[in-house]
Image: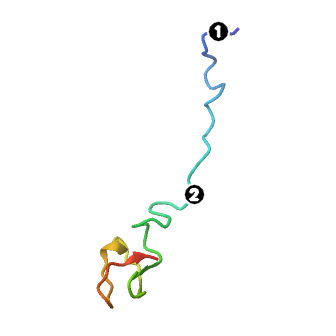
């Protein structure tokens, strides 16, 4: 019988599903944000020099080996 107080039997009703899952399956540090993992290259915005991205070092903390400017994730 309904109680009328908004409570119901345990495990039934809205809000008991598993969720909609918003992740993209990329894992830790995935994506194309700064510091987003070891893949890809760092590119110099001044001269265009391209160097492999070093793990645990964000591109913006690296200096271009050609002209000395700060690198950017590419």
Residue at the location (59% across, 47% down)?
21
Q: Nearer the viewer, residue 54 or 41?
A: 41
Q: Earlier in the sequence, mark 1 or mark 2?
A: 1
What is the quadrant of residue 57 in the picture? bottom left
Q: Is residue 27 left or right of residue 8?
A: left
Q: Is residue 26 left or right of residue 48?
A: right
Q: Which residue is mark 1?
A: 4
Quadrant for the N terminus, please: top right
Give the CA distance from mark 1 to mark 2: 41 Å
Q: Is residue 72 left or right of residue 69?
A: right
Q: Which residue is mark 2?
A: 24
Residue 7 position (above or below residue 44): above
- Residue 41, x across and y down, in percent: 45, 80
Residue 20 position (above or below residue 41): above
Helix, strand or loop for disc 2: loop
Residue at the location (34% across, 73% down)?
60
Outermost residue toward the bottom?
Answer: 66
- Residue 53, x across and y down, in percent: 41, 78
Badge 2 local density, few (<14 within 10 Å), some, or many (20+)? few
What is the quadrant of residue 46 in the picture? bottom left
Tell me how many marks there are.
2
Outermost residue toward the front?
Answer: 46
């Amino acid at each position: 019988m309904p109680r009328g107080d908004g409570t119901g039997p345990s495990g039934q009703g809205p809000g008991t599903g598993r969720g909609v899952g918003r992740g993209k399956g990329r894992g830790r540090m995935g994506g194309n944000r700064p510091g987003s993992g070891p893949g890809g290259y760092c590119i110099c915005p001044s001269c265009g020099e391209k160097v492999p991205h070093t793990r645990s070092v964000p591109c913006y903390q690296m200096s271009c080996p050609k002209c000395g400017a700060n690198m950017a994730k590419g």
